[in-house]
Image: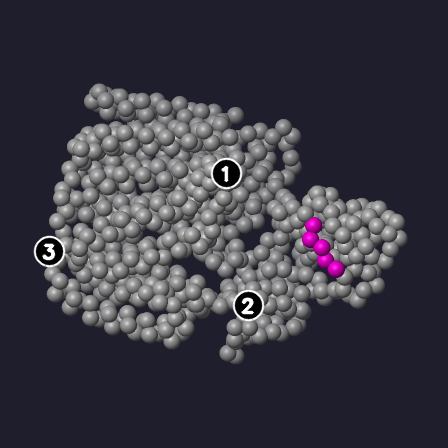
Amino acid sequence: MPGNISIYAAFFFSLAGALLYLGTLLSKRQGLLLYARRAYYFKTAAVIFTSFYLSGALITHKFKYFYVYAHTSTDLPFRYLISAFWAGQEGTFLLWALLGALTGLVIIKFEKEYESPVMFILLVGQAFLLLFLILYSPFRIMVDIPLEGLGLNPLLKDPWMIIHPPVIFIGYAALIIPYGYAVGGLWKKDYRGWISRALPWALFGWFFLGVGIIIGGYWAYKVLGWGGYWGWDPVENASLVPWLTCTALVHGILVQKARSLNIRSNIFLAIITHVLIIYATFLTRSGILVDFSVHAFGETGLNSYMMAFMIVFLVPGAVLFLTRYRDIPAEPVSEKWYSKVSTFSYTILLLTLSAVIITMGTSSPIISGLLGEPAGVDTSFYNMTNAPIVVLLALVLALCPLVKWKEADPKRIWSSLKWPAVFTGLGLAAAYLVGVRSLLKLVFIGSALFALGTNSAACYKASSRGIKNSGGFLAHVGLALMLIGILSSSVLSESAIISLKENETKEALGYSFTYEGSTFKDDKEALEVRVDHNDKTVTATPKMYMAGKDPMLMREPHIIRGLFRDLYLSPLEERLEKPGETLTLIQGESAYLTGYDIYFKEFYRDSHGEEGKIRAGAVLIVEGGGIREEVIPVLESSSQGRVFIPADLAGTDKQVFLEGIDVSEKMVLIRMVEKDSPPPEKVFVMEVSQKPLVSVLAFGSVLLMAGTLIAVWRRFSNYY
């Protein structure tokens, strides 16, 4: 099989290249370097070939491969055939290996002194990823070749699916490089020389990981329909934690370059950032968190290998760090509390503390599982523990541009506070007037406003000396705006739940809502709601549809965007309002309803219906009144909308409707009515929310990433 052969070849050349680079490092024989590079080129060529081969299999619908069968179908648009490459575990491992391989080509091209240690580390990482692909190959053959695939997960049929995973994995691939430089510096006892080389890569990985986190938040806000953009899901945290430690590393390197301080902590942060990426990979792909995360992958049988992956990078790095610890220069810090060095130290400490807390929360199923029953922590844990950290971080952020690397002048600092203080006071007054009364929330807003004021002034001054000098301050302005947007969109949010019959109008949150029926858009049932506000009318189209190999009800919100607030319409359910009684049943259980015992036997899946229709039902055994009968009420979704198809109870005047279905919870909602009941009316239930200043959050995100990109440009142009 060409795909599997190329994976084996890539694995072989990874091991060969790693051994040759290690030989170069240990023996100083430069002749080995040529062979090491050739091995790397062969390995990279094999990875590229494997990637193209998998892409070709996806595009041409080679359903003989289980991966192609599991993630595509013949009616899948081309853009999603491409993104199906990284829709499953095997594909993401290959994507990670591909991006890491391309990263190594840059190191070989431009790096001389540190090529051997960095490339050795990189190849060890590549070998593990390729080992995973050997053990869990995307080219596993189906015993019986199907004519059609299962299709892409409905939640992944979004344009952001094309961008988001590659962006995240570019960050993952890049952040092994600072690890390699740090370990290389320890090996060479060059505790200062490695940082200038590592800084561009740390910034590069930091940028892409940050962009990926922001895209993921926007994607959740736009598609998932729960009204938020960050839910502290373990997979979300998996990217956030290394981003926090990498942020700390970047600031620590800047201190080391300016004052030769933080040498030990920088080595530690460079090592732990990459180890945390591997740990996050283990958590989210081992099946441990499958009951605690909507994004986590299930069990694959790779747990012990992923654990070995983490140990191989953690233990040697830690041993080398501890062995060299006493040799690493540690200059005494004699800075005042308000100095530039101190503000950077506070930043590093707070970011690291936040990373530790989030890691503990994310790892709680493992920790609690060792003591008894595995359990996750509530989102309130993350909010409560990180809120004071964020307030302190914002205050440090405000102080940072007021101090210089040279001796800080208290008088100059105080004189610089006047206009930012006025700006903060006005902002707090505005927040109080719009209803913010909590002291903690006012402190949060005030600290963010203060940071915004001082950094905006500093950004303006820095940009006058050239755009390259403004990156850090611009990123800080963006972060301050994000903090304001996060608090406003959550604390000041208002919501209401509305039930609407067709052509019925109701008022909520100062808006008028009219349900005008349903239509079909993009193969999804769109529920048309006319929204009237201040003589303006907008037709919103939140969507509900059945999808997936085990048909599930999917929901997509509609967002009416505004400069100062978003109106968020999240569909909850579309039900039939009619007489009769309802009953919720779990598969394998029975319950009593209007004189009958009803047993929920199993789900019914019709895979032979008309094209474009999805039929899902419940197999029920109804007993009572002298009858015992198996009936199957069905819920059908098609281009004409959703249709409730009842099941008649023979010899009675009763009908059973299936009104709701949740395959993941093995649960259905049924209703029993009389056959001569009046025609049912459709009722649409939705939650409407006002989200203030989401636009500020979005704008701040753009500025944060723009500032980071400027910093990346500056550091790469300085070194390369």
Q: Which residues are magenta?
A: 581-585
Q: Position of residue 218 (x, y in %)?
A: 44, 56
Element at label 3: loop
Rendered view: 410 above or below 187: below
Q: Position of residue 631 (x, y in %)?
A: 79, 48
| C-alpha gap between disc 1 and disc 2 | 40 Å
Element at label 1: loop
Q: How many marks?
A: 3
Q: Residues within 10 Å of mark 2 (few under 14, many from 20)?
A: few
Q: Is residue 344 magenta?
A: no
Which quadrant holds the C terminus?
A: top left
Q: Amino acid at mark 2?
A: Ala
What residue appears at the point 58 percent right and 38 percent down from the top-left corner? 70
Element at label 2: strand
**Quarter of the view holding residue 67:** top right
Residue 231 visible? The answer is: yes
Q: Which numbered tag is attached to residue 372?
A: 1
| C-alpha gap between disc 1 and disc 3 | 55 Å
Q: Which numbered tag is attached to residue 407?
A: 3
Compare marks 1 and 2 and give the one earlier in the sequence.
1
Which residue position is annotated with label 2?
496
Q: Position of residue 46 (x, y in %)?
A: 41, 29
| C-alpha gap between disc 3 and disc 2 | 55 Å
Q: Amino acid at mark 1?
A: Gly
Tell me whether the residue at label 1 lies in contact with that at label 3, contact meaning CB atoms closer than 8 angstroms: no
Nearer-the-camera pick, 126 or 619: 619
